[in-house]
Amino acid sequence: MLEPRRDAQPPDSALRTTSFQDVFALRGGRARSVVVERSLSSPLLEASGRLTAGLPFELRYTLDTEDADEVIAEGLFAPLPATAAKTLIQRDALCLAILWSALTGVRHCRATLAVVGDSRCTKLHTDAISLRALCTYAGPGTVIAPGSRAEVQASASPRTVQAGLGDFVFLAGDRWPGGGAMHRSPALEDGQRRLLLVVDEGIRGSS
């Protein structure tokens, strides 16, 4: 069983780590966002690029994390061709769903896999949910501003950090104890797209 690490971290930080255990800093109130840094394999990067080259799409599926493995395979990813890349993203979806459930204590969540061709919300904001987990496989990653909403809005030029390709990103929302993480979608250049996997409680927002 995963347990929270006890390392002291400054409050309101956008914690960057390579350990999945550090996501529990959210539950302990030591961070509003956690970025678990990962590297994507070349085959997955190439496959993600091919997916974003086609028409934009959005696949959604509500699942019970107790049987998420089978449900994700038969539901969310069923429309995609059987490839090694599909298997890898499917595993990531399962991992994000399990971690999301462990943090929230809620069994049911919604998984979304989408090719996004627009900048959904490029202004810093918080989400009206409890917690969102996501991973970007192609295109620029989510931009996060450490600090509380009041601190970020009081700054003329707030400091930001940006998640990389393959990073697991966990963002507290307004319904999370201690408040939400200020973040925004990255600005996209003409013709640029993102391949994005999102796990949350099923309320639409931006990542």
Image (tube, grey):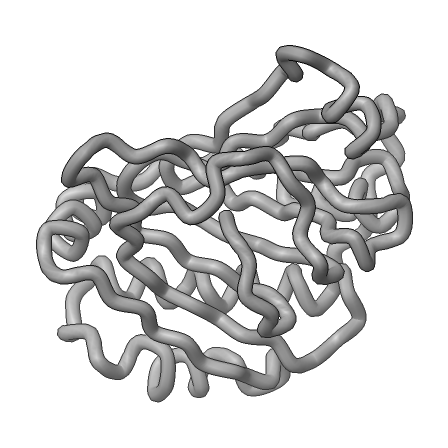
Give percent across and percent down for residue 48.
21, 50
Q: 39 or 125: which is nearer to us?
A: 125
Task: Identify the residue at image location x=35%, y=81%.
Answer: 73
Give the quarter of the image for residue 151.
top right
Please give the count of numbered marks on the rendered protein. 0
Task: Identify the residue at image location x=34%, y=60%.
Answer: 89
Q: In this view, does 138 lie above or below 115?
A: above
Q: 153 or 17: which is nearer to us?
A: 153
As drawn, is 23 to the left or to the right of 105?
Answer: left
Q: Can residue 18 be seen in this view?
A: no
Q: In this view, does 198 lie above or below 78?
A: above
Give percent across and percent down for residue 104.
77, 65
Give percent across and percent down for residue 143.
52, 31
Task: Identify the residue at image location x=32%, y=40%.
Answer: 40
Q: In this view, does 31 lie above or below 8?
A: below
Task: Identify the residue at image location x=74%, y=65%.
Answer: 102
Give the quarter of the image for residue 1.
bottom right
Q: In this view, does 82 lie above or below 137?
A: below
Give percent across and percent down for residue 46.
14, 44
Q: 143 or 90: which is nearer to us?
A: 143
Q: Can residue 15 be seen in this view?
A: yes
Give the quarter of the image for residue 23.
top right
